[in-house]
Amino acid sequence: MQTTMRTLRFIGWPWFLATLVVLVVGFREAIFLVPSDAAQGDVGRIFYYHVPIAMLSLLFPYINFAASLAFLYWKRRDPLKALAADALALASAEVTVVYTTICLVTGSLWGRAAWGIWWTWDERLTSMLILWLLYVSYLMLRRFSATGQTHSLAAVLSVFAAVDVPIVYMSIRWWRTQHPSPVFGGGPDSGMDKSMLPAFFWNLAAWALWGIFLLVTRFVLERRNQLAEQDDALRAMEASLEIPQ
Amino acid sequence: MIYLHHVLNHLRKDLRLEWRSRDSINGMLFFSLLIVVVFSLAFDPTGYPTTARQISGGVLWVAVLFASVTALNQSWTREQRNQVLDAQRMAPSPASALFLGKALANMVFVSVVELVLAPIFIVFFNLHPLGSTWLLALVVPLGTWALVLNGTFFAALGLRARNRELLLPLILFPIAIPALLAMIQSTTGILTGDDMLNPDLWIRMLTGYDIIFTIVCLLLFETVLHAE
């Protein structure tokens, strides 16, 4: 455990610097190098932020779900590994909430500029909002639940959320469909012009690196909290064993 | 067979407890009645029958949802008195039987409330349904089961939490959104007779939701009961 922490800290700084460099390159590509959009003008440049972040905010919930399943599996078999899995679940849930929030806010700004409205109850917007609601409620449960129970209850709720997401997606799809169809794999007209690709992939890489950096930092922080709690518990037990003569 | 016996025992116990006090049914009834009255005042449905048909599905389910949340918290608090829940934890009967019994009992309570509420609702909202009304006999139990099932489960989840009363709606509503959407869409479709709303599709979806979450709840309840 200690060695893993040290390795992570060792990688941390170079990773952070690399992320900053890629973010700067992505910014230059998206704002200065790519020709402005034929239909939308400079407003369309928000695409390079909105879409990568939206894609990533759909990725982190999977990490949360996998970590929660791992927690439930290790709970009785290997409690120490289970604790690590729980820290990962918490970290990924928080990053999910951050990324979905950014996705909703940038989408809303873009919607105002492109469609003239801040919000519409369309398929993708609604499902993203519900995803955000689900993970905020997950964090609420973690905050409110009784101390010893938090890990198991949160893992259970995460499983519920994961089961709920596909149902939400299908039901909202039947309910209504204003957002453009997916950029990739959404029909013959989908896909991007070649001139857009570098800016898109630089930003996707930058925000992925940044997300992973946040995730790992939060994970290490939570692990330290857990270790500190274990130490406190041990010390309290030792103190209770020393019977005053 | 033995499992069924356990479930029935739990169900009988919960029904008997409720019969002696009738706290949650009375509370839910009056609460949902108040919600219906407030909404009637807000929308003036007797003056606009078309609007009444369009909104009443939503109003009905919101009333049932809020009312059942108030009762669901109570249903586990009963078990906490005199450490009954700790005894349940040690009992050799499967944990999911306890859950299933309680969910069925809550289903009975909420259904009673709906049966009393429905005529009042029709009178207050001056409703003349245009679609095939018999489908409601399918939508209402399916919808109620979706709410009660997840509600009972999450009430157990928040049993020892701080702010227990607040926590239940906070985690129940986001998970129940697809079910609520299906109930409201199908009910509105039936009341307005608008085939564009496609009630059949929503009933099928609601059935799927019920089956999936019944399985998930039964599988995970033991983890929740022994969460330490």
Image (spheres, coloured by chain):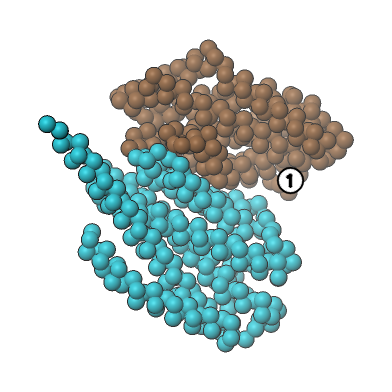
Chain colours: A cyan, B brown
- Helix, strand or loop under label 1: helix
Q: Percent from the top left, x then y, of residue A19?
A: 42, 76
Q: Out of B135 and A109, give the one closest to the viewer.
A: A109
Q: Percent from the top left, x then y, of residue A92?
A: 42, 58
Q: How many marks?
A: 1
B20 left or right, relative to B37: left
Is residue A32 positioned above or below B172 on the image? below
Subunit ID for the residue under disc 1: B
Q: Residue at x 65, y 64 (%)?
A: A108
Q: Is residue B135 visible?
A: no
The residue furthest top is B20
Q: Residue at x 37, y 40 (%)?
A: A147
Q: Out of B205 and B109, give the one closest to the viewer.
A: B109
Is residue B156 positioned above or below A207 on the image? above
Q: Out of A241 and B214, give the one closest to the viewer.
A: A241
Q: Residues within 10 Å of mark 1 (few under 14, many from 20)?
A: few
Query: Label 1 is placed on what type of residue?
Result: Asp
Q: Which residue, given by chain and number where applicable, does mark 1 sit on?
A: B195
Q: Residue at x 55, y 46 (%)?
A: B174
Q: Quadrant of residue B7 in the image?
A: top left
Is residue A201 positioned above or below B40 on the image? below
Q: Percent from the top left, x then y, of residue B14?
A: 48, 19
B123 left or right, relative to A200: right
Q: Is residue B195 visible?
A: yes
Q: Percent from the top left, x then y, of residue B126?
A: 82, 30
Quarter holding the N terminus of chain A?
bottom left
A223 left or right, relative to A169: left
